[in-house]
Image (tube, coloured by chain):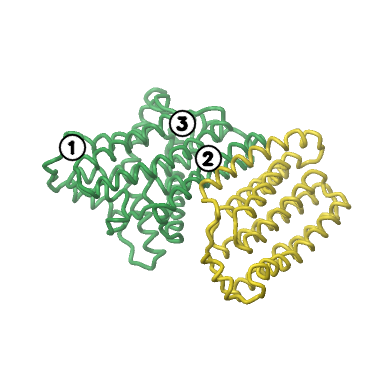
Chain colours: A green, B yellow
Amino acid sequence: MSAYYEFFSQALEMVVALAAAPLLTGWVNQCRSWLQNKTAPSLFQPHRMLHKLFTKEAVIAETASPLFRLEPYIIFGCMTLACGIIPTLSTSLPLSPAADAIALVGLLALGRVFLALAAMDIGTAFGTLGARREMFVAFLAEPALLMVLFSVSLITRSTSLTAIVYDLTHRPLAIYPSLAFAGIAFTMVLLAENARIPVDNPATHLELTMIHEAMILEHSGRNLALMEWSASLKLYAYLCLGITIFFPWGIPDTGHPFGLILALPILAAKLAVGGILIALIETASAKLRIFRVPEFLAMAFLLAVVGMLVHFLLGA
Amino acid sequence: MPMQILNLFAALMLLLTFAMLGQRKIMTLIQLFVLHGLMVVASAILIAYQTHNHHLYYSAALTFAVKVVVIPLILRKLLLSLSVKREVDPLVNVPTTMLIGIVLVIIAFNLAIPVAALSSSIASGTLGIALACIFLSFMMMLVRSNAVPQVIGFLSMENGLFFAATAVTDGMPLLVELGVALAVVGGTLVVGLFMFQMREHFDDLNVRNLEQHKEE
């Protein structure tokens, strides 16, 4: 019974992730449009685009190597697995012992390496430029993300995400100043890693300022669809990671089927609030010059480290 | 729980100090300074409530009036009337400043642990944060060439001192008096430093000279 339940919750979680990730992207875009006094596109616009792209023929450059053909599948796999590891609907997940928080960062890095390699593979200037910038941003963001996860692990004494959720939801409510630092650092990393506004503009048409869009310029058809889907999944994964670490209340841990049913609307509400916050930040801030990005991410790293130090000083 | 709220205030204060350290825009710097002052006031009120020390209420009120209302107003008015450059780069680039900041925080925390062990007050754990705020504010004064961030650095250092005083000793009457005196001194020094800086560089208080000076 328990094994079936675990398998079911894992499957449900991944299906929900695959279906909800484009919705989340649509929701963020919708909120952004509202905040900017524009007519908002439909919530299902990303779904429609995926549908359109999947029915189109994929055109691949003559110079493309097998790496380029394989890359969308690898990245899509990485992001789906990442969504499966992060406990969003249940903490009894068969996949969760496979990877803890540090391995999750590694998984995201693996996807990024392939993304950058494939962007360079074609040999166009923009792809290479995008790949270099992506690695430039990523090598600064990754230590900050690890530090955030470490400060949470210090509190809960575990790096396993399910154990973190279990521990946080089963202890008396307390204020953790270190988590306040970690939360701000995490938000900054989330914006940087998901090509959001202070670092990169997801809606840009100006090639010289692009990071993520420049890397996927050469993709078309189903390859592009998978890349877009992976980008949505990545945003979903990051937001879920934030929920898991900072607002885990509502994630059930018992083998009770009722918990799963209740967890779904709670997750949806949390994601909706998270999406609004992202849209607010994006609307309120201006895009940074590329050489100001190290400052932004140095700040994130510093906040995460100070969060850890505060934990040692205050014991909370 | 009050202890945890106090820790949260202390942590937010450290956060704001870091934000001020990395902030280029002077107007935002003043807003951050207002928040910084509010944190100090809130924690003073909290300690006063916890320890039933009525002197602390007065000093909190005075800090609020001086640091949150009057001084930011003066600075803002000065900035608006002087029409100086609104965005100034620190002398050391921001990532380096941040890394030095981490080192300062580590030093401050290590310095505070033995001292805090001796103190029996409810908020001794926050001494390290107060000390870190003082160090960081001091560094802000060092790495800024503009007068206004320097003044704000000085004032936030004073905030840190006041916070340390209330955190470690629950605000003894003597220290309360000292805090009041320091606050008044802070108020006069704001204007004094400002005038002094300008006159030292230009021999008069003409605001146009300040812009020329920025181009150096």
The residue at 20%/47% (across/down) is A124
Between residue B185 and residue A156, name the one nearer to us: B185
Q: Amino acid at mark 2?
A: Trp
Lateral position of residue B84 relative to residue B73, left or right: left
Task: Give the image location of residue B176, x and y in percent.
Answer: 84, 54
Between residue B196 and residue B203, name the one nearer to us: B203
Q: Is residue B4 above or below residue B17?
A: above
Task: Give the image location of residue A213, x and y in percent.
Answer: 28, 50
**Label 2 sits on residue:** A249
The residue at 24%/39% (across/down) is A118
The residue at 72%/39% (across/down) is B125
Q: Nearer the viewer, mark 1 or mark 2?
A: 1
Lateral position of residue B83 relative to residue B110, left or right: left
Please tell me which of labels 1 and 2 falls first in the chain. 1
Alpha carbon separation for disc pair 1 and 2:
41 Å
**Label 3 sits on residue:** A91
Chain name for mark 3? A
Between residue A255 and residue B13, name the one nearer to us: B13
Q: Nearer the viewer, mark 3 or mark 1?
A: 1
Look at the image and tell me in which quarter the N terminus of chain A lies.
Answer: top left
Q: Amino acid at mark 3?
A: Thr
The numbered mark at residue A96 is: none
Lateral position of residue B31 relative to residue A260, left or right: right
Alpha carbon separation for disc pair 3 and 1:
35 Å
**Number of numbered tags placed on the structure image:** 3
Please tell me which of labels 3 and 1 falls first in the chain. 1
Q: Residues within 10 Å of mark 2 (few under 14, many from 20)?
A: some
Alpha carbon separation for disc pair 3 and 2:
12 Å
Q: Is residue B188 above or below residue B39?
A: below
Q: Is any atom of residue A61 visible in this view?
A: yes
User: Which secondary structure lies at badge 2?
Assistant: loop
**Label 1 sits on residue:** A69
